[in-house]
Image (cartoon, rainbow, N blue to C red):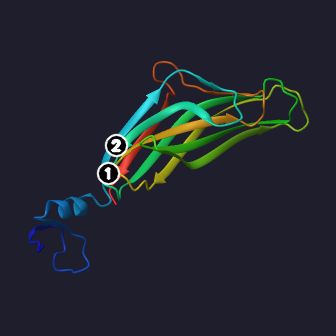
């Protein structure tokens, strides 16, 4: 199919190396060219309350959101902030740690681990002392899902020591809410 140029925007039109936006009369080509490197959509979700985790295998931490990409070549930037507290519950240990996992679920078909993060507190001289620490779990991850099907991104957590408690928390009135932001970027 032959395409005709409708218009050229930008400065330096006489410079062949200058950046230009070219608009074609073929809507599919125009959409692909116009969306490259741009934010196509952005959304966020937040949650309040506590999610208590005592499992040593990954389980939901109360932070999740879904997005459907407009283009299969798009990328999704995932941003997560979730305040948490980790308590050893007086176990006879010298350290306690919390682990987090970011996953993508593709239309309920498959779950894929994208990234992990770990946080710990170590007190080697005081075994059996109640070890408690607070921190903020953050993720900034750029995903290339290669689909236009629905995608659900989830933060999971687990304790590193049996008997410990991980509490993914949030404050009242929107203060320090657990939050996830999904941004579709044109490829």
**In the depicted view, which residue is nearer to us: 76 or 146?**
146
Which residue in the structure is indicated by mark 1? 39
Q: Position of residue 32 (x, y in %)?
A: 24, 61
List the single residue furthest toward the front.
Answer: 109
Residue sitting nearer the eye, 38 or 62: 62
Asked whether 129 or 57 is in front, the reply is 57
Q: Secondary structure at mark 1?
A: strand
Residue 31, given in percent of the width and then of the height, sits at: 21, 58
**In the image, 58: left or right of 42?**
right
Considering the image in quadrants, where does the C terminus appear? bottom left
- Label ID, residue 42: 2
In the image, residue 26 sits, relative to residue 89, either above or below, namely below
Circles 1 and 2, Cβ within 8 Å, touching? The answer is yes
Tag 2 secondary structure: strand
- Rendered position, 148 above or below 128: below
Where in the figure is residue 130, as x and y percent of width and height? Answer: 82, 25
Number of other residues with Cα within 10 Å of mark 2, as a class: few under 14, some 14 to 19, many 20 or more? few
Instruction: State left or right for residue 165 relative to residue 31.
Output: right
| Residue 146 position within the rendered picture, expressed as x and y whole percent measured from the top left | 40, 56
């Amino acid at each position: 199919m032959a395409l005709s140029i409708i218009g050229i925007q930008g400065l330096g039109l006489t410079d062949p190396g200058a950046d230009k936006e070219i608009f074609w009369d073929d809507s599919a080509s125009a959409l692909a060219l116009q969306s490259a490197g741009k934010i196509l959509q952005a959304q966020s979700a937040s949650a309040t309350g506590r999610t208590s985790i005592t499992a040593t295998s990954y389980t939901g931490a109360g932070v999740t959101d879904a997005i459907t990409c407009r283009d299969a070549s798009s990328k999704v930037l995932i941003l997560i902030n979730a305040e948490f507290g980790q308590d050893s519950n007086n176990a006879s240990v010298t350290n306690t740690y919390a682990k987090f996992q970011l996953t993508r679920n593709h239309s309920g078909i498959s779950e894929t681990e994208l990234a992990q993060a770990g946080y710990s507190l170590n007190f080697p001289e005081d075994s059996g002392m109640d070890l408690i620490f607070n921190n903020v779990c953050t993720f900034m991850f750029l995903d290339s899902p290669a689909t236009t099907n629905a995608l659900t991104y989830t933060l999971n957590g687990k304790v590193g020591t049996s008997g410990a408690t991980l509490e993914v928390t949030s404050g009242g009135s929107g203060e320090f809410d657990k939050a996830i932001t999904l941004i579709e970027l044109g490829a």
